Amino acid sequence: MEEYELGIVGAGPTGLFATFCAGLREINSITLEGLENTGGQVLKFYPIKDVLDIEGIPKIKGMDLAASLLKQAETFNNKIVTNSKVTDIKSDAGKFILEVNGSDAYSVKAILLCTGIGSLFPTKLNAEGEEAYAGKGVYYSVNALEPFKNKKVAVVGGGDSGFDLANQISSVVDKIYILEYGTAVKAAERSVADLKGTGKAEIMTDTEVKEILGDGQTVRKIQVLNRQTNSETTLDISAVIVAIGHKTETNTFKSIKFDTFANKLEVDDNYSTSIPGIYAAGDACTSGNRPKMGLLAVGGSEAYMAINSIKKYLNPSASIYGEHSTNLKL
Ligand SMILES: Cc1cc2nc3c(=O)[nH]c(=O)nc-3n(C[C@H](O)[C@H](O)[C@H](O)COP(=O)(O)OP(=O)(O)OC[C@H]3O[C@@H](n4cnc5c(N)ncnc54)[C@H](O)[C@@H]3O)c2cc1C
């Protein structure tokens, strides 16, 4: 079994910055991410939105921020592995075994949980053809504008996410249908007005997607039912974006139990959980039984402080503080 000083669980913004900090403090770490890519909520929820509240970065798109975080995390070549969901944590003679995707995988001396709001899964439509065309015209997030360029696109879901995604792609598409199951759209008035202002949107309420049809390679049509009139219509479209919400799977590790508050891991001033050797940072944790607003800058600062505490835990004679990065010659 591979051995590391530190296992970082989750490669969202907090886990990625923690990976950089671990390298800075010369900690031999492995970072494990359950999803197919790193970046956490930034990449899943707002890849094309501008983030304005990170110190020193006046404006950056979510996808650019996710790419920068990964690049910075790779500075010291600390290992990062995706498609690796930590499914259990077992104590093992002063160390821990990280079970990944159901099998014992890594032995570590300390753990930093950067698991955010848990594992994220998009809610599926369960329409015929959806599975067959997933990634071939059926999308659950927008990571680039190219697949929608000069196309007719159906966005399923008339809530904030649906309108956000529709607005994000509106500059490149020919036409956008918003398909809402209920009697009215539920997005913020400003988003609705922005989309209507493009002159490219058609909003269809009381509409259920029955089937996604294609030519085997990509989506060509969509069959929808008007729930008021019970009549079916076929729309010629080339892409479907499903925006009917995400499900979050809360982490429960069967071999270990943590103190929590409001579904977050309770940590002390050193970012230690109730289990010595296991720390937490970012959206995953809170302290003093207080609710906490999840913010990128907060997660980053907590990651830095947690790594300093972990350095001291791993090597009690080490200084709690490392060097300023300006002292390094990279
Ligand atoms: C729509 C929206 C807009 C936002 N806008 C802003 C903003 O403008 N400014 C701002 O500062 N903040 C903003 N935020 C909040 C910000 O995105 C979060 O605070 C930040 O993403 C927290 O980072 P994190 O790494 O702690 O958690 P997450 O981003 O949730 O990342 C956690 C990662 O851990 C992984 N994971 C979970 N469990 C496991 C497991 N068992 N094994 C392996 N991997 C696991 C997840 O898959 C995920 O990739 C916004 C959030 C949303 C939803």
Image (cartoon, rainbow, N blue to C red):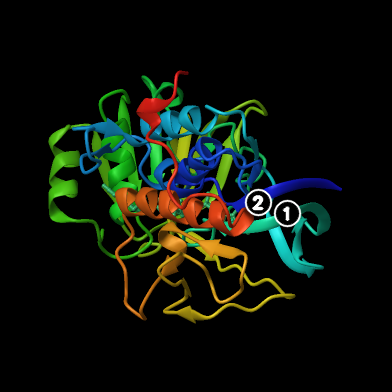
Q: Residue at x 31, y 23 (%)?
A: 172
Quarter of image, res 185 = bottom left
- Residue 210: give x, y in percent of width and height: 53, 53
What residue did someone put label 1 on?
Answer: 108
Work out whether 254 lies above or below 116: below
Q: Is residue 125 visible?
A: no
Q: Is mark 1 within 8 Å of ligand 1?
A: no
Q: Are marks 1 and 2 in contact (CB under 8 Å)?
A: yes
- Residue 198: give x, y in percent of width and height: 17, 32
Residue type at mark 1? Answer: Val
- Residue 177: give x, y in percent of width and height: 33, 41
Q: Residue furthest front?
A: 317
**Along the polypeptide, which appears first: circle 1 or circle 2?**
2
Q: Residue at x 87, y 48 (%)?
A: 1
Work out whether 96 lies above or below 16: below
Closer to the camera in the image, 185 or 69:
69
Q: Residue at x 32, y 74 (%)?
A: 291
Task: Assess disc 2: are there few (<14), some (14-19) or many (≥20) residues with their C-alpha within 10 Å of its C-alpha.
Answer: many
Measure the C-alpha gap from mark 1 to mark 2. 6 Å
What residue did someone put label 2 on?
Answer: 7
SS at mark 1 in the image:
strand
Residue type at mark 2? Answer: Gly
Quarter of image, res 254 = bottom right
Q: Residue at x 56, y 77 (%)?
A: 274
Quarter of image, res 219 = top right
- Residue 326: give x, y in percent of width and height: 35, 27
Closer to the camera in the image, 174 or 193:
193
Q: How many numbered marks does the figure carry?
A: 2
Q: Is residue 272 toward the left or the right of residue 299 in the image?
A: right
Task: Assess disc 1: are there few (<14), some (14-19) or many (≥20) residues with their C-alpha within 10 Å of its C-alpha.
Answer: many
